[in-house]
Image (cartoon, grey):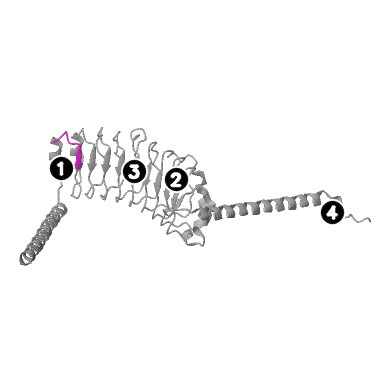
Amino acid sequence: MRSLKMIMILKKRKKTLKIKRKRKREGKMRRRLGRRKKKRRKRELTDITLIQNFIHLRYVDLSDNLIRDLSPLSSLNHLLWLKVDNNKLTSAGMDELLYLQSASFANNQIKDTNGINHPRLASLNLKGNEIEKVTGLDPEILSNLHTLELRGNNLKSTTGFDLPKLKNLYLAQNSLTYLEGLTELGQLTTLHLRDNQLETLDGFSEDMKSLQYLNLRGNAISQIQELTKLLVLPMLRALVLLDNPCSEEGDYRIEVLVQLPRLERLDKDFFEEDERAEAEDIRQRRKEEELELEREREQEKEQEDQELEDPSAEEEIPVE
């Protein structure tokens, strides 16, 4: 019995030691990660001239520095991927990089979109800058660009996006009050317009035949009838309307479905079958009411025409 107890005690001590060692290793790992993060935050690189000697680089991340000039990168003819977030850049303009496919300039001080002319560029991130208007994006040069991120700028217009292959466009957190210039985006599937100042939904076109997802959260749309302007979008299946005045109306989900019968999701929740049935009933009833009103108007018009044609309705001329 005594030897069995000793064995149990030894096993327990061994297990305790293992747990302590594991915790010690985890503590060391956390401290190392913490030191790495601190080192990362302390980057203060301003001059990248030396990088031009490494002409075969394909992936470059120069984020979290104080860089103002990207001209030394023009010698990196094999560059595929570039990330220069959180620097002091005022322009994203660079010499043409023939093989560049992905570029991120997020959270700088960039004021325009000029000088971006990389023919194989597929994804461009300009989030968190100071851009007020999109200019200089040549559709012939940027024929492969499919994703454009412009969240958190100062955009007041949606012109300048004549990009034939664009599929994903992110324009949230800008200063947009109306939409224009989007009608040529025939391959666009995703459009984010969250947290702008839109009151109406003019600016959409039947030429936008691929648009499936539209995020309008946090705008100023008060009239639910504005949604009828989205009927020109044949592929629209998902819509986000939260935090608009119209989303506070009673039977909001049903009313949206009445206006847009092809919709599958609203505010990320799929419509249930009973919601679809109720919306269809309301739609049918309103159609019948409209037909009845139309018949009444026609009858009133016929009656007015008859009164005009009836000679007995004319005033009698007094005989002297």
User: Magenta part of the protein: which range?
Assistant: 54-60
Mark 3 vs mark 2, CA separation in Å: 17 Å
Which quarter of the rendering shows the N terminus? bottom left
The mark that comes first in sequence, 1 or 4, is 1
Q: Secondary structure at mark 4?
A: helix
* Amino acid at pointer 2: Glu
Amino acid beneath label 1: Ile
Residue drawn where x is 13% and y is 53% of the image: 36
Give the CA distance from mark 3 to mark 4.
70 Å
Task: Select label 3 or label 4 by which is in front.
Answer: 3
Q: Local crowd at mark 2 within 10 Å, few (<14), some, or many (≥20)? A: few
Q: Amino acid at mark 4?
A: Ala
Q: Does the magenta stretch mainly form a helix, a strand or a loop? A: loop
Residue annotated with mark 2? 180
Closest to the observer, 203 or 59: 59
Mark 2 to mark 1 CA distance (whole Å): 40 Å
Q: Secondary structure at mark 2?
A: loop
Q: Amino acid at mark 3?
A: Leu
At which x and y percent is residue 216? 42, 53
Q: Residues within 10 Å of mark 1 (few under 14, many from 20)?
A: some
Task: Give me the disc on residue 148.
Answer: 3
Residue 290, given in percent of the width and then of the height, sits at 64, 52
Q: Is residue 92 visible?
A: no
The residue at the far right in this view is: 320
Q: Quadrant of the C terminus?
A: bottom right
Disc 1: which residue: 48
The residue that mark 4 highlights is 313
Q: Nearer the viewer, mark 3 or mark 2?
A: 3
